């Protein structure tokens, strides 16, 4: 049949269509893969942001409703269920419009709605480690700019009854340098503990592997889930690293420096920093 078709093509004055070369086929496959990759990147970087924005807005509205109800009914239960918002996080260095409702839990569904608390970690303001995970690209990307945080930058957490102000810890490894970095925003006891005490190995920012769950323990780097007597109140933020990859984790550690009871009517001065 091939010969017949070739003969007819020859009689019609038409040349047989050349077969595609291997390089052409490979090129078309690569082009298709490239287009699919671009579409996926668009979905991850844009469309998931839209979806997450709606979920975050809904979580924030529900949080306001819960807090308002608790003011009317002091017996209102405020212990969060998985997937519920229970606090707000502000990072003044990222702009006055940066604030996210913090969700209970770190499952994918939880993190789609906003940054989520590791359920085995402590709550805001408590001694130990309040640990929170968040996406860096797409899905709201609350932690996209963690790599821009500097020593002493404020991270403010608002709960129903308090404002908790944390400051990013020193990033140097040398004790004297750590003391110098911390002196601007931590008290003398905290400076000493970060320069030569039990927090000497806790860096303000580091890159590690996903299996280093000890970063979320009460004393980061110490494989003990018990909160030691006299522990400081820490905040740990975790996100994927580098961008568009989950091969590693970026970790930011901060220490509580101020706690304001909301009944005083005061707001932290740190909220006005930029």
Image (cartoon, rainbow, N blue to C red):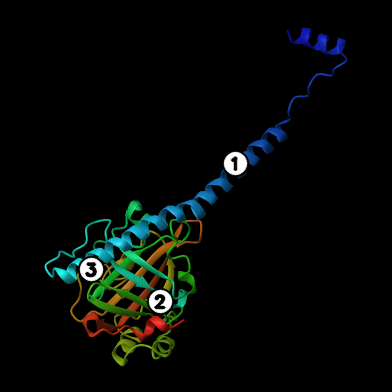
Q: Is residue 225 visible?
A: no
Q: Are marks 2 and 1 in contact (CB under 8 Å)?
A: no
What percent of the width, then of the height, locates residue 248?
45, 60
Q: Is residue 53 visible?
A: yes
Spatial distance from mark 3 to mark 1, Cα to Cα? 49 Å
**Residue 10 quadrant:** top right
Q: Which residue is mark 3?
A: 67
Q: Which residue is mark 2?
A: 204
Between label 2 and label 1, give the one nearer the viewer: 1
Badge 2: residue crowd in 10 Å (few <14, some 14–19, many ≥20): many
Spatial distance from mark 2 to mark 1, Cα to Cα? 40 Å
Answer above or below: position of 14 versus 35.
Answer: above
Please tell me the numbered disc located at residue 222.
none
Q: Which residue is mark 1?
A: 33
Taking depth in this image into account, of 63 and 18 the one nearest to the observer is: 63
What percent of the width, then of the height, locates residue 207?
44, 67
Taking depth in this image into account, of 86 and 192 the one nearest to the observer is: 86
Q: How many numbered marks, from 0 up?
A: 3
The answer to whether residue 46 is left or right of residue 70 is right
Q: Residue at x 41, y 89 (%)?
A: 176
Element on which disc 3 rests: helix
Q: Residue at x 77, y 10 (%)?
A: 5
Between label 2 and label 3, give the one nearer the viewer: 3
**Residue 208 quadrant:** bottom left
Between label 3 and label 1, give the one nearer the viewer: 3
Q: Are marks 2 and 3 in contact (CB under 8 Å)?
A: no
């Amino acid at each position: 049949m091939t010969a017949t078709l070739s003969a007819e093509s020859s009689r019609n004055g038409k040349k047989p269509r050349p077969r595609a070369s291997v390089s052409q086929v490979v090129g078309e496959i690569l082009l298709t893969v490239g287009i699919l990759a671009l579409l996926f990147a668009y979905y991850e970087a844009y469309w998931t942001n839209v979806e997450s924005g709606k979920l975050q807005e809904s979580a924030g509205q529900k949080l306001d409703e819960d807090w308002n109800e608790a003011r009317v009914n002091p017996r209102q239960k405020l212990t969060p269920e998985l997937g519920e918002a229970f606090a707000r996080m502000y990072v003044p260095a990222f702009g006055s419009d940066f604030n996210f409702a913090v969700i209970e839990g770190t499952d994918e569904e939880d993190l789609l709605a906003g940054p989520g608390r590791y359920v085995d970690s402590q709550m805001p303001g408590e001694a130990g480690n309040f640990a929170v995970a968040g996406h860096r690209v797409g899905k709201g990307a609350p932690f996209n700019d963690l790599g821009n945080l500097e020593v002493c930058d404020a991270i403010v957490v608002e709960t129903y009854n308090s404002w908790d102000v944390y400051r990013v810890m020193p990033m140097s490894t040398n004790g004297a340098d750590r003391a110098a970095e911390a002196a601007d925003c931590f008290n003398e006891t905290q400076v000493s503990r970060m320069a030569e005490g039990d927090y000497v190995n806790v860096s303000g920012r580091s890159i590690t592997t996903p299996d280093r769950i000890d970063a979320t323990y009460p004393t980061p780097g110490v494989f003990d889930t018990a909160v030691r007597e006299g522990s400081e109140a820490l905040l740990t933020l975790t996100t994927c690293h580098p961008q568009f990859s989950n091969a590693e984790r970026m970790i930011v550690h901060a220490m509580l420096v101020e706690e304001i009871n909301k009944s005083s009517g005061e707001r932290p001065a740190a909220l006005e920093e930029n």
